[in-house]
């Protein structure tokens, strides 16, 4: 069973799983049933699974041997933690054999507990078998950088700093997750699913140059302000691991490939 199945990551994981397993082996956990038409058409069983409705959870997890629990997108971490604890308790009570959880790469390296370390601890405390799929930063964060303006002006402006990123597209994370979900040998293991090498804003400017055919340089500008830089500086986006490529079974997307969907056709 995959929760959050109508979401972007859940949908991509299910598309990959359908290449590996019969649809009849899969169950989609869905908050909003009206969004599940394509899943139903694929022959996948749909169950109403709402992290805010404890009564939906235990029923929905009945008979599930392997649960891929996709973390909640709620903006408040206190709410997310409550939702996650409900899911874990319901899975334990329903007798789910093995829970796989999508957390965040290298989230254990800071000194402060966060939503993902706390959720992982709750899964450990439940006594269920687990696998922790610790996902890199999604490549989507580049949306805040105004890449099309960088191409037009030939300058990618960012705040000063030693920024390095292990970000990858969801499609790579989904391929690795599907492989892990569909195969054995992952009980009580943790994987950091990141790009194999960290990239910099200078590397990003180079990728924009290659994609657009126009020179783009990187410039540090202390006047640039956006909340995301505060958030990025508080998390580890620089550490890398080979786990993603190992489970994808092929090289991760290059920076140029990863960034291409975020620039407009006229610029490419
Ligand atoms: P997404 O497209 O927003 O999908 C989130 C999924 O969660 C949707 O299916 C949504 O259902 C479902 N959901 C929301 N509230 C729920 C609830 N109360 N009960 C059950 N399901 C609920 O997010 P995504 O891109 O697939 O990402 C998956 C998760 O990764 C996010 O939820 C977030 O925790 C995390 N994340 C990671 C990064 C990163 O950089 N690694 C960045 C952003 C988010 P509906 O379709 O009904 O809305």
Image (tube, rainbow, N blue to C red):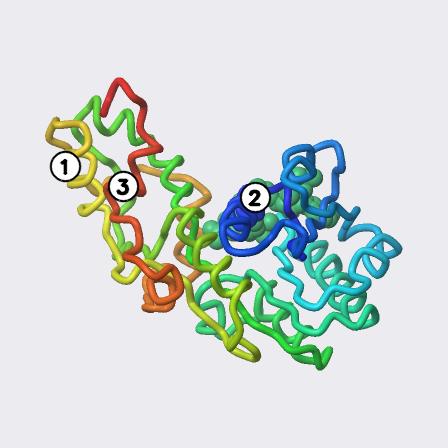
On residue 11, the disc is 2
Circles 1 and 2: CB distance less than 8 Å?
no
In the image, 121: left or right of 239? right
Label 1 or label 2, whichever comes before in sequence order: 2
Query: Which residue is found at the position 42% from the left and 41% from the top?
Result: 140
152 w.r.t. 9: above or below: above
- Rendered-image quadrant of the C terminus: top left
| Real-space CA distance between mark 1 and mark 3, rounded to the nearest whole angstrom | 19 Å
**SS at badge 3:** helix
**SS at badge 2:** helix
Residue wearing tag 1? 217
Camera-nearest label, 1 or 2 = 2
Query: Which residue is found at the position 65% from the left and 40% from the top?
Result: 39
181 w.r.t. 10: above or below: below
In the image, 7: left or right of 94? left
**SS at badge 1:** strand
In this view, the residue in front, 201 or 240, is 240
Query: Which residue is found at the position 44% from the left and 47% from the top?
Result: 170
């Amino acid at each position: 069973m995959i929760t959050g199945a109508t979401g972007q990551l859940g949908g991509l994981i299910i598309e990959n799983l359908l290449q590996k397993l019969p649809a009849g082996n899969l169950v989609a956990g869905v908050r909003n049933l009206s969004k599940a038409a394509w899943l139903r058409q694929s022959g996948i069983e749909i169950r109403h699974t709402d992290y805010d409705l404890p009564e939906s959870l235990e029923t929905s997890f009945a008979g599930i041997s392997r649960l891929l629990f996709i973390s909640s997108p709620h903006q408040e971490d206190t709410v997310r933690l409550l939702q996650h604890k409900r899911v874990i308790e319901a899975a334990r009570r329903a007798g789910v054999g093995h829970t796989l959880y999508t957390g965040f790469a290298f989230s254990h390296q800071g000194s402060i507990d966060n939503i993902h370390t706390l959720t992982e601890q709750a899964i450990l405390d439940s006594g269920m078998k687990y696998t922790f799929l610790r996902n890199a930063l999604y490549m989507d964060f580049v949306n805040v950088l105004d890449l099309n303006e960088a191409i037009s002006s030939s300058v990618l402006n960012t705040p000063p700093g030693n920024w390095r990123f292990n970000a990858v597209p969801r499609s790579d994370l989904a391929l690795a997750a599907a492989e892990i979900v569909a195969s054995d040998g992952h009980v009580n293991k943790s994987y950091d699913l990141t790009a194999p090498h960290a990239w910099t804003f200078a590397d990003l400017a180079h990728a924009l140059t290659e994609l657009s055919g126009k020179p783009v340089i990187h410039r540090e500008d202390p006047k640039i302000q956006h909340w995301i830089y505060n958030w990025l500086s508080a998390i580890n986006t620089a550490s890398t691991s080979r786990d993603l490529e190992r489970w994808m079974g092929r090289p991760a997307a290059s920076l140029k490939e990863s960034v291409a969907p975020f620039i407009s056709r006229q610029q490419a």
